[in-house]
Image: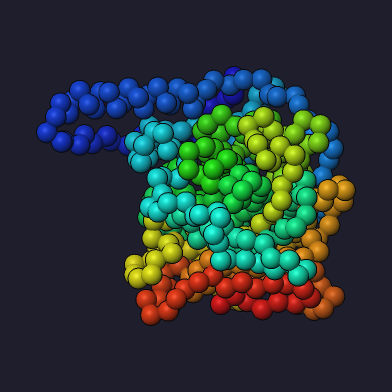
Amino acid sequence: MVKRSFIFIFVATTLVALSSGVDVKGEARKSLSEVDQKLKLLNKPAVKSITMRPSFAFPAKSSDSPASSQTWQKSGSCPEGTVPILRVGRQELLSAASLEHFGRDGPPTSSAVNTTTNDRFVYHNGSKFAIFPVADHSTAFLVATGYTFLGAKGDINIWSPRVESSDEYTTAQIWLKNGVGDIETIEAGWMVNPKFFGDASPRLFGRWTLDAYQTTGCINVVCSGFVQTSKKIVLGGAVQPVSQRLGEQFQMSISINHDPISGNWWLSFGDEIVGYFPGSILKYLQQSATKVQWGGDVYSKKVKQSSPPHTATAMGSGDFANSLWGVASFIKNLRIVDGYILVRYPQWVSHFSEEPYCYTAYNYKETPAAEPIFYFGGPGRNPNCPLESRNINAWFCFFSTISMPCN
């Protein structure tokens, strides 16, 4: 049994009944009963660790900047044969839009993007590749496409950006995608999500979906999917320290790699293997990914607005990408694993921002011989975001030897 000191427990606050002119007590009892059933499913008792391991190892690359750790590790680690669990509290379920959508985005405010007609593209080596936006998400990222991908890695700068509303969140992450319209993804990085986690700390997360977050998949392990194997690192654990503006910068090293034998995708935090996304739950991604992205994502019903108010939820550090080192958020030491199992920086990449007046992207080389560092982020709402008088289409920037910021 996992010791209680190694399990995160969120304290439920006072419950308030909502009167609607019906049997309030009866409805409340029914709702609480449903919540308690869901809690039993989510907060399962400790089980033996899964002994499965990947059939090949992603080559380790030492970081040249201070790395992160998880705050719960100050209390120790789980006993041998068990794994840590982030417990979900009743209050987190009661604050969700619905039990069905807990751990997933809420119902979209607009229909999914038509994948047959899309005028947003990036260009690699003379070829054109479509970018498929997702309703209620605003992203700024570096993208590699045109290959068969079997893995990706990056050292992600850690910040604690502002989240305006509890039903919004912001991330810094890696995506691997496949399927018509990029609808199938596996993802990992850090997330600030007050409603889901109960606080504003940046926390390690993993996520998957088969239909662009509509009805499948979830964050972390609140649905069947990701399998935890590590007893040292837990999905949902707060990461520290946080970078300081014009001060020391801290980062977390994330890699996601495909096992050609099992079809699983293994997630690593630094040198520690956290667990895997089973190939059995995936369709297109069972074999490989066709696109990799590194960057940030803001989820809000108030993004992609043609008129105010836009959300003030920040991405990254909350500063625009061209602020560069010590101010803007970054991802460095980017790597992909190609179809030949070669680990390398991708040959062709493009940086992209869906709302360049709100959040920006910049793949920057300090010198011609230096490896690029990808910067991204922004404050969200500002005097130029959104702009009613302008047609705010995404700006598309591509990188060959040096690139300019999308802002």
Camera sees residue 240:
no
Q: Provide residue 127's location: percent of width, then percent of height.
A: 73, 66
| Left or right of 26, for residue 257 | right
Q: Residue at x 40, y 45 (%)?
A: 107
**Residue 346 vertical position relative to residue 185 in the rendered view, above or below:** below
**Residue 211 vertical position relative to residue 327 in the rendered view, above or below:** above
- Quarter of the view holding residue 12: top left
Q: Residue at x 35, y 41 (%)?
A: 97
Q: Residue at x 44, y 55 (%)?
A: 136
| Left or right of 103, for residue 165 | left
Q: Provide residue 128's location: percent of width, then percent of height.
A: 69, 65
**Residue 274 vertical position relative to residue 111 in the rendered view, above or below:** above
The residue nearer to you, when weighing 272 against 178, is 178
Q: Provide residue 341's location: percent of width, then percent of height.
A: 86, 47
| Left or right of 260, for residue 398 | left
The quarter of the image holding the N terminus is: top right
The quarter of the image holding the C terminus is: bottom right
Q: Provide residue 260's location: percent of width, then percent of height.
A: 81, 36
Q: Residue furthest left?
A: 21
**Residue 155 vertical position relative to residue 397 in the rendered view, above or below:** above
Colour option used? rainbow
- Quarter of the view holding residue 362: bottom right
| Left or right of 347, for residue 75 | left
Camera sees residue 173:
yes
The residue nearer to you, when weighing 185 against 312, is 185
Q: Residue at x 14, y 29 (%)?
A: 22
- Quarter of the view holding residue 75: top right
Count of number-bearing discs: 0
